Amino acid sequence: MAPTPLEAEIRRRIALAGPMPVRQYMALCLTHPEHGYYMNRDPFGRAGDFVTSPEVSQIFGELAGLWAASVWQAMGAPENVRLVELGPGRGTLMLDAMRAANVVPAFRAALVVHLIEISPALRARQEEMLKGIDVPKLWHDSFDEVPDGPAIVLANEFFDALPVYQAVKQINGWYERMVGIDERGNLAFSIADEPMPLFDQLLTPAVRNAPLGSLFEWRTDNLALELGRRITRQGGAALIVDYGHIESAIGETMQAVGRHGFADPLGMPGQVDLTAHVDFQALRLAAESMGVRAHGPLDQAEFLRRMGIERRATALKSAVTPDKAKDIDVAVARLTGEGRTGMGKLFKAIAFTDPKIAGLPGFIR
């Protein structure tokens, strides 16, 4: 099989500079300006490579919108607030959130929507999806471009797509995991020539004492730090829903997905999605270091139930045919279920708020 255009570029870089860190490889696969996975396609939905919660049911986005409206009221109902979404996909979540925001007209009137999206293809889909929404909408390449002021941030399945570092424990320390070319000419994992200095001191005891050969993944905390700093200094909140683990732990979670099935992470660079579990402990500690109040994490199923998913489903079913009602039940079961296709247990919800906001919808019983 001929290499993908991005694989040819990766091989060229390895030939010039040697094996590259896993984080660099993952970043190229996802966001290379010309050949990156997200840059030229719409990967969402049944016709794409995977389905996210907003695509499963409109209820998810509606509950996110109600959550944002409740937070706005807890903030003291500022007359001008930025509603920010990180990685808006097709714009489905924001569309449903705006529909729910109609129940609080003053909140909707106070909004300016800011969408953080680097993909030209997805920006075009979002503009089409949201063209009927009568609130100001602005697009940005990064969160730090959002103007100063109170902000409510939504991030669904965003952090899992941020590139991860990987390291492997050897007898004399931890070595960064790399992507190089093996003796058969294939892309292959390897480790750096030298251990990472002082790396042990940055790890939790459970990870530090892992057996030889263990693999550990981590991300830079820059975005979590920026979220925490922004919320503490200017007011607001952030809701993050993603799949991952509550405590830092060893083990490889980076995976490739294409056409709703798993693939080889090194097999088709730029043609399949690469993700890795979110370390919610690290995420929380980084944000808290900036002074925010953290709420959660808790299972997505529990968060959605506390937000009233069953009540909303019942209301929707009362206005549709029995077949449509059955579809609603299936969607709710997927969002809250724990089976092989259920998202309720694997996915977690965590929120960060201005310290003055104590009780938070979805995180109080």
Image: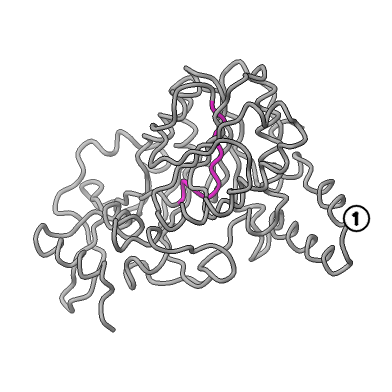
Quadrant in the picture for the C terminus? top right
User: Whole-percent x and y of residue 180?
Assistant: 20, 64
User: Whole-percent x and y of residue 300?
Assistant: 65, 47
Decide whether the magenta segment is chiefly helix, strand or loop.
strand
- Residue 143 vs residue 151: left or right? left
Q: Residue at x 52, y 50 (%)?
A: 127
Q: Residue furthest left?
A: 16
User: Whole-percent x and y of residue 354?
Assistant: 56, 20
Quadrant in the picture for the N terminus? bottom left
- Residue 87 vs residue 162: left or right? right
Tell me the SS state at disc 1.
loop
Range drawn in magenta? 151-160
Q: Residue at x 67, y 20 (%)?
A: 77
- Residue 340 vs residue 269: left or right? right
Q: Characterize the local packing of mark 1: few (<14), some (14-19) or many (20 or more) Cα atoms within 10 angstroms.
A: few
Q: Residue at x 20, y 70 (%)?
A: 8
- The residue at which mark 1 appears reads as 318
